[in-house]
Amino acid sequence: MNAAPIDTSNPAVRDYLSLIRLQVLTPLSLLINVATVLVCAVVVKPTIGGVANAYPTSISPKFWLIEIYVAAIWVGQIGYCFLLLLARKPETKRTAVKGVGLSLVFANWFMAIWAVAWVLNYFIIATIFQGLLVLFLLYANIVLLVYHSPSSSRPFDTGLIHAPIRCFLILPLSVLFPYSLFLALGLYNKPWGRSPDTGMAGLITVLTTNLLGLVVIVLRRDIVWCVAATWICVSLWTQRPKPAPIYITTILFTVLHPLSLISAYVYTWFFRERQIALPPDSEEPNGNLGYRANNGTGRREEPRPREVDAEELWG
């Protein structure tokens, strides 16, 4: 017989096949990401950090702090890979398949290609792949927040899906993409000849990314964004020398990010107006429940059964 063993037109079957594909491709892409970045950071010469030291800019970070940040992303992704294999809740599977999908797979590949282009001093190629990395991760984060928002009833989804994907986005958005772009445009300190004045460009970059993060932290009370943005600010002002405006700005946002998060929580708990739930319609003002007057005759009749909608019956 030529009939297919499974019906691929069934949406449930397609979702199951998508989950199987993610269970294979996500760990593979993470392995390629980790192996490539580690080789470029430790084995080859110049290393990723060596290139950064050779091309300093006004937004250069302290790279060992960025390395810790990247390691935390890897740990979170390892947890996500285990969650793909062990998840039993339909909501978790739906979040992985519909929310993250293949965006994380492509992001890991882009990160690996960026590392190779970076150590080869192909800064234009490195910038292109960092831009693609931002776009894919931004799409995944928007879909997660809009259609699969984190819930306190599923803490593993929040810790192993939302948190790693968001941290992964903040890294290229705040540091790696602007840094690669600066090098591609020649906005770095040259030991030979005249170095361009990149103070204003660096200040605009730092202000834009941190103001964006501040808005997200305040509106969503986002702990993950707060921790990640604060860590990146620390990595920026600890790398010296820095132009005074950028140095002061990064220190200021190091304080503002956690302070804004605490203020947002205080406002939510103590100053936001609480909605008062109205009593059900079936309750009478005189306190007699379940009876209704019969056209002013004084007699009371039993309430008639409420019709149950079929959609309500099945939940």
Image (tube, helix red, strand yellow):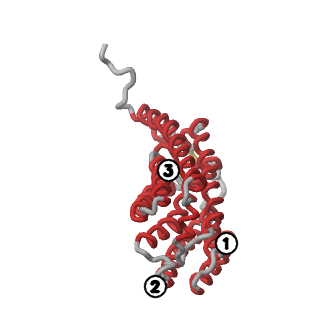
Q: CA distance from mark 2 to mark 1?
A: 39 Å
Q: CA distance from mark 1 to mark 3?
A: 29 Å
Query: Can you tell which mark lies on residue 108?
Result: 3
Which of 314 and 308 lies nearest the eye of the viewer?
314
Residue under label 2, please give it: 194
State which mark lies toward you, 2 or 1.
Answer: 2
Check disc 3: other Cα within 10 Å, few if <14, some if 14-19, many if 20+: many
- The x and y percentages for residue 126 are 44, 61
Q: Is residue 8 left or right of residue 159?
A: left
- Against 94, residue 41 (above or below) is below
Amino acid type, mark 1: Pro
The image quadrant that residue 248 belongs to is bottom right
Mark before the other along the chain sequence, 3 or 2: 3
Which of 82 and 38 lies nearest the eye of the viewer?
38
- Against 17, residue 198 (above or below) is below
- The x and y percentages for residue 64 are 65, 63
Residue under label 1, please give it: 258
Residue at x-position 46% and y-position 67%: 180
Amino acid type, mark 3: Asn
Residue at the farthest top position: 1
Q: Quadrant of the N terminus?
A: top left
Which of 268 and 199 lies nearest the eye of the viewer?
199
Amino acid type, mark 2: Arg
Residue 282 can be seen, yes or no: no
Query: In the structure shown, which secondary structural element does the residue marked by tag 3 occupy?
Result: helix
